Image: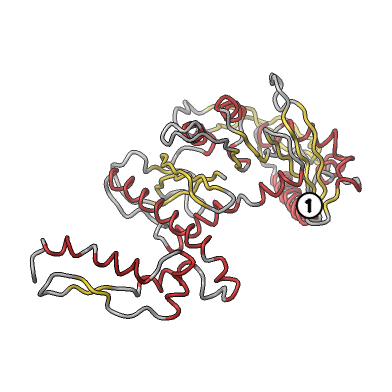
Amino acid sequence: CYDSTNVNSQAEGIFIVQKGHAKDDPDKDQVNTEYTIRQRDGMPVTFKNFPGSLNDMSEASDMITELKNLQDGLDTGVKFHIIMIADRGYVSEENITEMRNAGLGFILMLRKNMGIVDEVLDAHVSEVKMTENYDEETGRFGLSFTQKLFEDDEQDTCFHIVWDGELERKHRDDLMKCVAAAEHRLQNAEKRHTRMTKQELDNDRTYFDIHCHEEGTLIVKKRGRGAGEDKEVPSYVINSFTRNREAIDHASSKCGYMVLVSSEPMSAKEAMLAMSRRDCVEKTFRALKSSLGMDKMGVHFEPSLHTKSLIWFVASILHALIFSKTEKLRVKDRKRSTVPALVEQYEEITADRDLTTGTYQRRYKLTKMQRQDLAPCGVSLDMIDQAISSLHGNARNMPRV
């Protein structure tokens, strides 16, 4: 499973610290960090840092190369097959072509604004809710078929259309809010005799029939790097408008559907479950930012930034190991057996240095709770004492205080 997050930074003079698309505050500088997580056990596989200004699609290209090297066993000598699961933000013809050329499998969710989504829904939406496509376990309908994903494709791709009742309610609520907001905006524009550009009118013509006349011109300011000079364009004033009931009903009929594609044949249920378990990446990010300090960088030099990122990556591996091995503990006591609570128990195991001999000794006996928490990880009292005794050799060379 593959996803990215942003980490805020106030460091100056570091190339990859740039303004991007931060959800909390777009004005903050950030670094984009991408993780790939093994789905079956939530184990981090690899990570990569990118400049904060890059979008998801651009970053995915580099990660595809990393995964290809991993799949080919360039570092380990062990070859295996990787199926990449990612959300709609990483879907583009270039990225999918790169995945195919790299020999990577994929399960992806298509964006709604992709033309192929409307095409397959118009062709198959009437078949999805048939009885044979219902899954009792999930309460969803799913239909699978194969066809070309892009016009110039030389191979077919497996499509999966999934319908979900809760998703339908959410989609329809969002649709009606969007229509109501556009209607309010058009009412104000008509009442105030507001001049609008053709592009502004076209944005609202999706669900409205708008009658207008041309009146004067407007200066459109160019934005972004290399935008060029401002441009003068014709302006229009709205005479009247009405809801396009047919367009709204057509959009409403597609509420609740999501379109997935996979490189390999599988059922709609298999693709849907694989995509729903993609939250293992979000859980890793949540752990990193809530208890492992990844909410901010806190460094001022690029080498330090990459070193700290590596430490976080190792910490996320240890977090995943502790979480997977202590699963049975959470069945008995879910609250006390969270990873932060377990780590707190582990950190209470300490050793003191004898100033005379320079050796270290464990300070306290292990409590019953500590023994129970360490046992699933395969850590015994003997192993702890052996680790403490290994400090003796280094201690002898240390100056006495």
How far across and down, in percent of the image, does residue 329 sit? Answer: 55, 71
Q: Residue at x 28, y 42 (%)?
A: 13
Q: Secondary structure at mark 1?
A: loop
How far across and down, in percent of the image, does residue 336 sit? Answer: 51, 75
Q: Is residue 136 above or below residue 366?
A: above
Give the total of numbered labels.
1
**Corner quadrant of residue 401:** bottom left
Q: Is residue 231 above or below residue 344?
A: above
How far across and down, in percent of the image, does residue 229 sit? Answer: 47, 26
Label 1 sits on what residue type? Asp
How far across and down, in percent of the image, does residue 359 sit? Answer: 17, 70
Q: Residue at x 66, y 47 (%)?
A: 275
Q: Is residue 306 above or below residue 102?
A: below
Q: Residue at x 76, y 34 (%)?
A: 212
- Depth check: give the residue in front, 111 or 65: 65
Image quadrant holding the N terminus, namely top right
Q: Residue at x 41, y 74 (%)?
A: 345
- Depth check: give the residue in front, 103 or 166: 103
Neighbor class of circle 1 (other Cα within 10 Å; few <14, some 14-19, many 20+) is some
Residue hosting label 1 = 164
- Depth check: give the residue in front, 330 or 268: 330
Q: Residue furthest right?
A: 131
**Corner quadrant of residue 392:** bottom left
Image-based side of 97 in relation to 183, left or right = left
Image-based side of 200 in relation to 293, left or right = right
